Amino acid sequence: MVKASLIAMLVLTVLIAMGLRWREQRVPVVKRGNMVARGKRTINRWVTAAALAALVTMIFMGGLHWLRLIRT
């Protein structure tokens, strides 16, 4: 179960980060900024994606756990 949750978190993190990047590219940006601002934006995107992936994984795995408890 631990391996499944880690794999799910990894896959969800990558997918959410790709979605956030796609969303950022669609929004018109007035000023691109320097390399430091770009780096901060990238780190913020990955941290946000990891937090959302952790939340979704906890809810999903917790739901599976409760379903298993209810069935027995």
Image (tube, rainbow, N blue to C red):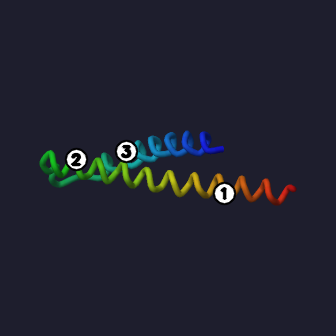
Disc 3 and disc 2 in contact, CB within 8 angstroms: no
Disc 1 and disc 3 in contact, CB within 8 angstroms: no
Rendering coords of residue 67 (x, y %): 77, 56
Residue 57 located left or right of residue 40: right
Mark in the foreground, 3 or 2: 2
**Mark 1 lies on residue:** 62
Kind of residue at disc 3 = Trp
Q: Residue at (41%, 42%) from the top-left corner? A: 18
N-terminal of the two: label 1 or label 3?
Answer: 3
**Mark 2 lies on residue:** 39
Q: Nearer the viewer, residue 21 or 52?
A: 52
For this orientation, the residue located farthest to the right is 72
**Within 10 angstroms of label 3, few (less than 14), some, or many (20 or more) residues?**
few
Kind of residue at disc 1 = Gly
**Mark 3 lies on residue:** 22
Residue 71 located left or right of residue 22: right
Decide: is 70 above or below 57: below
- How far apart are the alpha carbons under marks 1 and 3? 30 Å
Secondary structure at badge 2 equals: helix
